[in-house]
Image (cartoon, coloured by chain):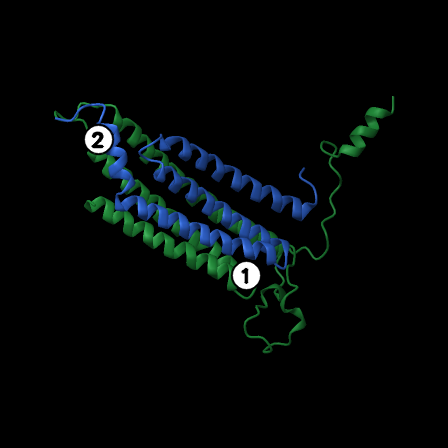
């Protein structure tokens, strides 16, 4: 017999020590390492296209990182909000890349 | 860990490997056209693998929360199905936009005659440098584009016309 008020606490404890949360945390750390390497390329890049390429790849990694953070937060909150954030960030990332490329090529946005 | 969680962990591990190798490739490749290759492809595959692994983890929770006689909380599976749907939508969105953005970057660099790296080398001096930009294709921009200024977003002309009367 499980009391209804003790069920969420048991769920929190099980999820906080389960191996899947460590897998998600390791994925987050790997994505952060990749983003740091891309940031080095974006700071060092000899031309503007290298910087745009590195920042675009960093944006893709950030989208996946936000989705992973959603699953770190799984037992406490609703991960659906984090996924909304990552979808919007993916759209903004694409539009910003195209806009910056157009500005670089034509020197204006019209 | 159940079978779905182990499968999801394996997919996420593969995604981590692809993400790290893609980042190292972007950092270490010799010139711009070579850097396009890891940035364009391995990132796309890495995000697909990681998001599919996350969807498998959410699928295990969906199976746990499936309504039955012993489980009276019948509303939890709707939120988990929503999460899996959003993960699929995000994967499809990144599959469409990431290669398109990489293609746009490559085309902009090519039309800009981005060739400053290998031109001061003789052929055979540096085997790591590419000579892609020496090939002349239709649409090359050898000098900055000269377009007539548009009347819509040219701020200075608009302001000047407004200030005339």
Residue located 75% across and 41% down the image? B148
CA gap, disc 2 and disc 1: 49 Å
Chain under disc 2: B
The hue of chain A in the figure is: blue
Residue located 70% across and 57% down the image: B142
- Judged by depth in the image, the label closer to the viewer, 2 or 1, is 2
Residue B18, image quadrant = bottom left
Q: Secondary structure at mark 2?
A: loop
- Look at mark 2 in the image and give the residue it sits on: B65
Q: Tell me residue A101's x, y (percent).
A: 61, 46
Q: Which chain is green?
A: B
Which picture quadrant has residue A103?
Answer: top right
**Picture disc at residue B33:** 1
- First in sequence: mark 2 or mark 1? 1
Q: What x and y, as percent, mark residue A16?
A: 29, 40
Q: In the current view of this chain or complex, which residue is farthest to the bottom?
A: B124
Q: Quadrant of the N terminus of chain B?
A: top left
Image: A33 above or below B53: below
For this view, does B138 lie left or right of residue A29?
right
Q: Are discs 2 and 1 both within one chain?
A: yes
What label does residue B89 carry, if any?
Answer: none
Q: Give the chain letter at badge 1.
A: B
């Amino acid at each position: 017999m499980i009391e209804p008020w003790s069920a969420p606490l048991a769920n929190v404890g099980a999820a906080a020590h389960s191996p899947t949360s460590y897998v998600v945390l390791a994925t987050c750390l790997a994505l952060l390492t990749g983003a740091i390497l891309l940031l080095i390329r974006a700071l060092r890049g000899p031309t503007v296209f290298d910087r745009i390429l590195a920042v675009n790849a960093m944006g893709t990694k950030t989208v996946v990182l936000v989705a992973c953070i959603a699953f770190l937060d799984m037992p406490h909150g609703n991960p659906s909000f984090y996924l909304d954030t990552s979808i919007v960030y993916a759209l903004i990332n694409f539009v910003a890349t195209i806009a910056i490329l157009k500005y670089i090529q034509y020197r204006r946005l019209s | 860990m159940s079978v779905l969680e182990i499968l999801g962990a394996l997919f996420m591990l593969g995604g981590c490997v692809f993400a790290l190798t893609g980042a190292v490739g972007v950092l270490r490749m010799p010139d711009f056209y070579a850097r396009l290759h890891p940035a364009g492809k391995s990132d796309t595959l890495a995000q697909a693998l990681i998001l599919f692994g996350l969807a498998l983890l959410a699928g295990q929770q969906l199976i746990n929360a499936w309504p039955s006689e012993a489980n009276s909380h019948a509303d939890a599976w709707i939120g988990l199905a929503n999460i899996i749907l959003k993960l699929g939508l995000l994967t499809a969105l990144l599959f469409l936009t990431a290669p398109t953005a990489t293609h746009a970057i490559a085309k902009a660099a090519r039309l800009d005659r981005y060739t400053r790296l290998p031109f001061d080398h003789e052929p055979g001096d540096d085997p790591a440098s590419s000579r892609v930009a020496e090939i002349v294709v239709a649409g090359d921009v050898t000098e900055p584009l000269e377009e007539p200024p548009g009347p819509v977003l040219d701020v200075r002309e608009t302001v000047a016309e407004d200030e005339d009367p």
